Amino acid sequence: MATKTVRDIIRIDEEKCDGCAACALSCAEGAIEIIDGKAKLVSEIYCDGLGACIGECPQGALTIEKRESDEFDEHAVETHLDSMKKKETLPCGCPGSSVQQFEKTVELPMVDPLPCGCPSTTVQQFGDGHQAKSSVQQDAALAHWPVQLTLVPPNAPFLQGADLLLASHCGPFAYGNFHQDFIKDHAVLCACPKLDDAQAHQEKLTELLRQSDIKSVTVVRMEVPCCGGLTHLAQQAIVDSGKSIPIKEVTIGVKGNIVA
């Protein structure tokens, strides 16, 4: 049984917290996780009370207070961090996680013939709000698999010498021309800083940057505050990798426009 003692420990104001995950990424002990959109202290024994997470919170939702709590347990922290790392691997050996690289081929556009024999290549909009089917299908720009950050091994060949696109899960749904404007000529990784294990993502990306010769990183995120954790994650991974890699951020609005 853990021993109670009066000591410094983190306090999280949930009313101020917007779930950006910056604190979770900065906590080396893994004491903070994003649960139901809010930062939570998952266990008192993981918090050392030093407050490294406080300066990372843009909302000022974190403070250090002195109160009775379980003692900090360094051994428990090591076990906890090991368990977090194990979440990155799939025990099922799912074939969907196998690394693949594609050769892009150029295909002629498909056409829908009209009864008269002429191709219908013009998109039309009718009074009922429905669009006519376009005869030209835009080629996908993705040149490798997998794309989930958790599944991509740090030594994946498609990462070597690549310009890296780190995308939020929602971005490709919101922005209609995502493939041609962002994925084209990039190695692609996607992650969610709010619903995924942000700390594990940061550690994985750090190792990936160390082992590959990434030339640049472009983060494409949504405008919602929690998605800002994706940029923070990438910035910290670059610092931890010990490399100097240029990074830029593109922010997509929920209506599908680029806002920054």
Image (cartoon, rainbow, N blue to C red):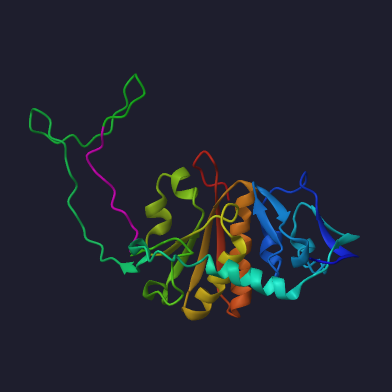
Q: Position of residue 230 (x, y in %)?
A: 59, 58
**Does 112 lie within the magenta span?**
no
The answer to whether residue 14 is visible is: yes
The image shows residue 236 at horizontal and vertical percentages of 63, 69
Q: Nearer the viewer, residue 241 or 15?
A: 15
| Outermost top residue | 127
Identify which residue is drawn at 54% across, 41% down. Answer: 254
The answer to which image quadrant residue 133 occupies is top left
Residue at 67% x, 74% y is 78
Left or right, 180 with respect to 241, comes to left
On the image, the x and y values in percent for residue 117 come to 7, 33
Q: In this orientation, does residue 20 appear? A: no
Location of residue 6 with respect to 14 vertically, above or below? below
In the drawing, does residue 25 fall left or right of residue 244?
right
Considering the whole magenta stretch, tell me its main secondary structure: loop
Q: Position of residue 79 (x, y in %)?
A: 65, 72
Q: Which residues are magenta?
A: 133-143
Residue at (42, 61) in percent of width and height? 147
Q: How many marks?
A: 0
Q: Front-most of 4 and 191?
A: 4
Residue 136 in the magenta stretch? The answer is: yes
Name the side, left or right, on which 52 lies relative to 90.
Answer: right
